[in-house]
Image (cartoon, rainbow, N blue to C red):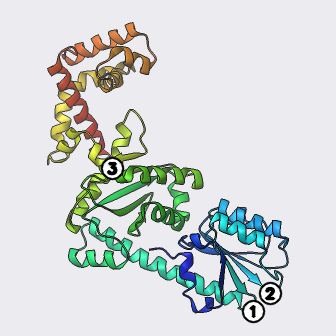
Amino acid sequence: MFVNVEDIFSLEIARNFQLRAGRNGLSNPVSWLYICQENEISPWVQGREILILYGPGIRRDEDSLAGIVRECALKKLSAVIVLVGNFITEIPGKMIRTADELNIPLIEMPYTIPISQVTRAIAELIIRDRSRRRNIGNLLMDILNGYEIYPGNAKDEFISSGYRWGAYNFIFAIKIEDANFASQIEDILGNLVQSILRTNVYYIQGNRIIGLCESELPDNSQKYENKFRKVVSEFREKLGLDCTIGVGSCVGSITALRGSYIHAIWALKTESIRARREPVIFFSRISGIFKLLMEIQDFSVAESYSMSILKPLLDYDREHNSNLYDTLLRFMDTNCNSKKTAELMYVHRNTMNYRIKMISGLTGKDLGSAEDRYELMTALKCHQFSILHKDR
């Protein structure tokens, strides 16, 4: 797992540290540290740092020091280390009470300990942890790309890293819209993913975070839906990043993880053909016909079938700049309810009826016939699948 505040106390340099408040926050993950010599910290921190507080520039009255703790909680910092004995002679009671209230570990450090040695020791601990996590992430990457040939050993390595191997396990893929910014804050992204999903097995590649999670049941949607939605909201609210998550199927072995990975990527890709944007897409909830189409070896079969029915419709839209194809999609999505489709497309019901007649004429299918509707729905799914395959 990630370095947390409690791990700092295992360092030799910290043997004379004293925890004064915030014991409930000792599990807070630590991404880096920030030396603070003034009361304003917001412009300089990203979250998950340990704040080291000392220097003559700090306002040392108890309201100001308690205010620093509140700002740390607001910015999601992990802990505060206060140098005591020089500029700050003692930690005031209000600061202690505030830290306890907000679950911010408040650590007293004698000013006689060289601060450069403290920062070096904490930084080295974090860097060693990053290296270990990078290695386990690389192992996952090798498995998903088909390079890992020792699946038994891989499982042992996952477990020894702190990952809880479940009866079932699955791959998730988080697609981040602002890839450039995401690449600059990889550790912060990883900390958020770990703190919410409780997994340390992941890697970041381009604009995607690929990770591994365990599940007690073969269906992961019930346990993880709220957690993944929290990831989406945390990315948006704390980092200003929009993301979409594809969740693969649950599998029981290391060798089957690649299949779960493929399913997670396919789930992500279906976002482009959905009428409504969904931030979390579970493969288990994808239309059954898509799952069936994924099993065919020759993808041109799906395209050929769709074009045998939809080509006149697509040609007409292209030549006349119309939207009969979209109308058919919406019509099918509303269970062939022309009134509801008209409302969704902001057109008069008479206009909708005219479009439906046009669709029937161009495709040769009667939308009043259950069998013809089934053929049209199958053609639409095959066409959407062909689009996804070309974009793969």
Q: In the rendering, at what x and y percent does residue 235 appear?
A: 53, 54
In what quadrant of the picture does the N terminus appear?
A: bottom left
> Residue, x 74% and y 83% (percent of image)?
83
Q: Dot 2: what SS?
A: loop
Q: CA distance from mark 1 to mark 2?
A: 8 Å
Q: Dot 1: what SS?
A: loop
- Per the image, the residue denoted by label 3 is 221
335 sits left or right of 302 in the view: right
In the image, residue 230 sits, relative to residue 15, either above or below, namely above
| Quadrant position of residue 213 | bottom left
Residue 178 visible here: yes
Q: In the rendering, at what x and y percent does residue 174 appear?
A: 42, 55
- Per the image, the residue denoted by label 2 is 85
Tag 3: amino acid: Ser
Is disc 3 surrounded by few (<14), some (14 to 19) or many (20+) residues within 10 Å?
Answer: many
- Per the image, the residue denoted by label 1 is 112
Earlier sequence position, callout 1 versus callout 2: 2
84 sits left or right of 148 in the view: right
> Residue, x 34% and y 49% (percent of image)?
222
Q: Nearer the viewer, residue 71 or 328?
A: 71
Q: Nearer the viewer, residue 222 or 339?
A: 222
